[in-house]
Image (tube, coloured by chain):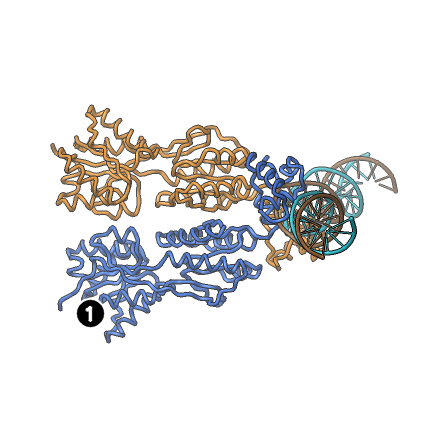
Chain colours: A blue, B orange, C cyan, D brown
Amino acid sequence: MPLTLKDIARMAGVAESTVSRAINNKPGVGKETREKIMDLVRKYNYRPNQLARGLAKKETQMLAIIVAELSGADYKIIKSIEAYANEQGYNCIICNTDNNQQKEEAYLALLSNQQVDGAIIIGGELANKNIINTALNKNGLLVLVNCLSEELLIPTILVDSGRGGYLATSHLLEQGSRKVAIVMGSRKDYLESEKLAGYLQALKDYHLEVEEKHIIETDGSREGGYQAFFQALEEGDLPEAFFVTKDILAVGLFDAIKMGGYLIPEDFSIVGYGESIISSIIDPGLTVVAEPLEELGRYAAEYIINLIQGKNPEEIIKVLEPDLKIGESSRFKIR
Amino acid sequence: MPLTLKDIARMAGVAESTVSRAINNKPGVGKETREKIMDLVRKYNYRPNQLARGLAKKETQMLAIIVAELSGADYKIIKSIEAYANEQGYNCIICNTDNNQQKEEAYLALLSNQQVDGAIIIGGELANKNIINTALNKNGLLVLVNCLSEELLIPTILVDSGRGGYLATSHLLEQGSRKVAIVMGSRKDYLESEKLAGYLQALKDYHLEVEEKHIIETDGSREGGYQAFFQALEEGDLPEAFFVTKDILAVGLFDAIKMGGYLIPEDFSIVGYGESIISSIIDPGLTVVAEPLEELGRYAAEYIINLIQGKNPEEIIKVLEPDLKIGESSRFKIR
DNA sequence: AAATATTACGCAAGCGCTTGCAAATAAGAA
DNA sequence: TTCTTATTTGCAAGCGCTTGCGTAATATTT
């Protein structure tokens, strides 16, 4: 049995309250008593029971990071959140929902249960609104990252995917390509649809017609990327460039292009989305839309902690801007 | 303010204890009262405060998964742990230590603090023994995965990396290569040293001399893999095959080999370690030592939960066997 | 030296839940 | 009907900690 405050108090010959104050270094404890207590604490390696503490204080100094899939990008965000949170004396627990509503619900319960002081939800489709609502009603503090709530007014922080799509597409256009296709995941995914919007806007700004067949929606897998190319090939009127919204898709697309005996970027210029190991491994190195993931995480962490500490931030939604990292997969086309 | 047991009790006109028993569906509550209570619970979406519950019951139904780096492999293990744990009514929180002793300590405190019922440590160097010890002394339950404790007798479950090294190397030897090099991370890393041991054993079984210069220790990075090849090149007496112990290393090695104008597997056969996206992306597809990660996680989860529930398992250390997944990067050599 | 302001400490209630035990009620056996 | 046994429910202590308030001890002021 671990020892308790009471044990320490008995050993030090003082009241529990004094020990408590000493441990939390609050005022109201004499220098000598404080030292005697701290010595005992060290000697017996006493650690306060956080459940009891949490119960009494109604705060746990814990944050939940609820994440749908745990991709490489998410991981960077998480690390950044953790870094800031730790700095501020909070610990983070990562809850992986696997895109499963049930699990999301279970983890959101951590919030309603007061096991964590706040939660950050990263990506994925948004949970059942009821659940979020009850979590919020019970005073739970929530921040959304890279996803959007439809009706509830929940603080949200995200990278402007529309802008990303625009950057990618206009880069390809600037490089001289005129027929640019987009290979994307599901349009139902908010971020994907935004990228598409950016793509469309860029075409518009260049006074180009939108070709429906150049909008290739896939399942987001490697295989999907592979098929996307051959689909384009079959349709005839092959694009000169591809904007690929996911790195795995890019891998498949590369496979297919090479399989077809074409060269990148000579035959096809390609821009991908997100800096990842994968996009750095594939050859030639991918030009990508780079997202400020660190900043994203940092901001989210700051936001939730401010919320917890009662400082009400000014803006409820914060949008960060991506930029373009030029690789070898896109090159100026002489026309 | 979330409502409490007391609120429900008042509304139902019964004692708190009755509500508690109803909620935990324990015997000793009449059918009608039970229903009345459960209706209230549903109506107000009441959720017991887990801190209070944990404090009273001295158990939280929570597991901590403490992981050093969160690589792709670890992620698979985690998912498998979670799956089983959820099945058994436990939730998992993932604690990422970033190979930082301080953080490891902080997270292990979750155990000593009784915030979790048990913890699973995956990979990485082992924490400060004192910390682990105190955690254990306080009755904390711990299982190690893919790492080893030096002196403490902690239940451990791992994949036999020695066997993996042996499989990889003997495969290359069987394919006709005689000069096989190993490109590895730090020898201080237990798993790496085991792989090396397996490599050496295979050479021995084939009655081959060990060439010190064919043991290439690197920092485990892509760059490290890259340099490894040119180092071998400079040394003269180029190997015919490489056993690479990490996928990132393999990427660098591939880069270098291609850069040198050589072909895989024509000029060099290569075997990597661990099935990962990366090893599946690089071209040609890597032959790898595949680890039963699912089983590993599942077993670890089973183990810790048994421990928590007081069932003492028979073996304190469990070793799983890897096997070989043949890709295109290794091929029979005609000599 | 007396009066006032500080500081150090203990008391006790309370956080929200569980649980052993006793009381009250219902049901079955005699 | 009366006694026994089983079932339903309440009481109250306790889990380990925090904190407001009161008192005793010490320091500061005149």
- Residue at left 50%, top 43%? B63
Q: Single out the residue that lies furthest toward the left.
A: B335
Secondary element type, mark 1: loop
Vertical order, B301 against A111 (above or below): above
- Residue at left 45%, top 42%? B102
Q: Quadrant of the rendered structure where residue D13 is? A: top right
| Residue D6 x %, y % | 72, 39
Sort mark 1 into few (<14), some (14-19) or many (20+) by Cα contacts within 10 Å.
some
Q: Nearer the viewer, residue A237 or A36?
A: A36
Q: Nearer the viewer, residue A140 or A314?
A: A314
Residue on which the image places disc 1: A178
| Residue B208 x %, y % | 19, 25
- Residue at left 42%, top 59%? A299
| Residue B103 x %, y % | 45, 44
Position of residue B193 in the picture relative to residue A307 (left or right):
left
Residue A29 visible in the snapshot: yes
* Dot 1: chain letter: A
- For badge 1, the amino acid type reads Arg
| Residue B310 x %, y % | 55, 33
